[in-house]
Image (spheres, helix red, strand yellow):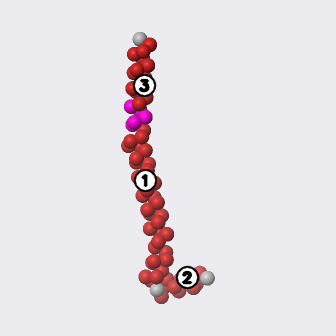
């Protein structure tokens, strides 16, 4: 089985690139989307949470004072 796969890769390089290249491209795309999601969380959601907490804390301290 492995020998026939190697023979396929040696004899038909473009077909083997199509067969083996699609999962590699999919993995790269999934990885890039994961990096983009992490950047989105770090750049937008976490600072927004800090701002909301700061506003809440300031309002609470003004109420009690």
Q: Is residue 44 above or below residue 59?
A: below
Give the percent coordinates (x, y) of residue 10.
Answer: 48, 85
In magenta, the rendered stretch is 47-51
Name the residue nearer the viewer: 6 or 65: 65
Circle nearer the N terminus (3, 1): 1
* Marks 1 and 2, how far apart at CA: 33 Å
**Residue at 47% over, 72% down:** 22
Note whether 47 is above or below 34 in the view shown: above
Q: Residue at x 48, y 80 (%)?
A: 16
Q: Residues within 10 Å of mark 2 (few under 14, many from 20)?
A: few
Identify the residue at image location x=43%, y=23%.
57
> Is 5 placed left or right of 30 in the picture?
right
Q: Quadrant of residue 32?
A: bottom left
Asked whether 23 or 56 is in front, the reply is 56
Residue, disc 2: 5
Identify the residue at horizontal 38%, vertical 43% (top origin).
43
Q: Is residue 14 above or below residue 22?
A: below
- Give the CA separation, mark 3 to mark 1: 31 Å
Instruction: Check disc 1 and report its element: helix, strand or loop.
Output: helix
User: Percent from the top left, x then y, of residue 19?
Assistant: 49, 77
- Quarter of the image that includes the C terminus: top left
Q: Nearer the viewer, residue 15 or 63?
A: 63
C-alpha separation, residue under disc 2 versus residue under disc 3: 63 Å
The picture places residue 59, in percent across and down from the top left corner, at 40, 20
Residue labelled with disc 1? 35
Work out whether mark 2 precedes mark 3 in sequence or the reverse, and give the earlier one: 2
> Helix, strand, or loop for circle 3?
helix
Q: Quadrant of the N terminus?
A: bottom right
């Amino acid at each position: 089985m492995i020998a026939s796969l190697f023979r396929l890769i040696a004899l038909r390089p473009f077909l083997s690139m199509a067969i083996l290249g699609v999962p590699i491209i999919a993995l790269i795309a999934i990885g890039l989307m994961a990096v983009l999601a992490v950047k989105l969380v770090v750049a937008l959601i976490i600072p927004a949470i800090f701002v909301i907490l700061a506003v809440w804390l300031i309002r609470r301290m003004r109420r009690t004072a």
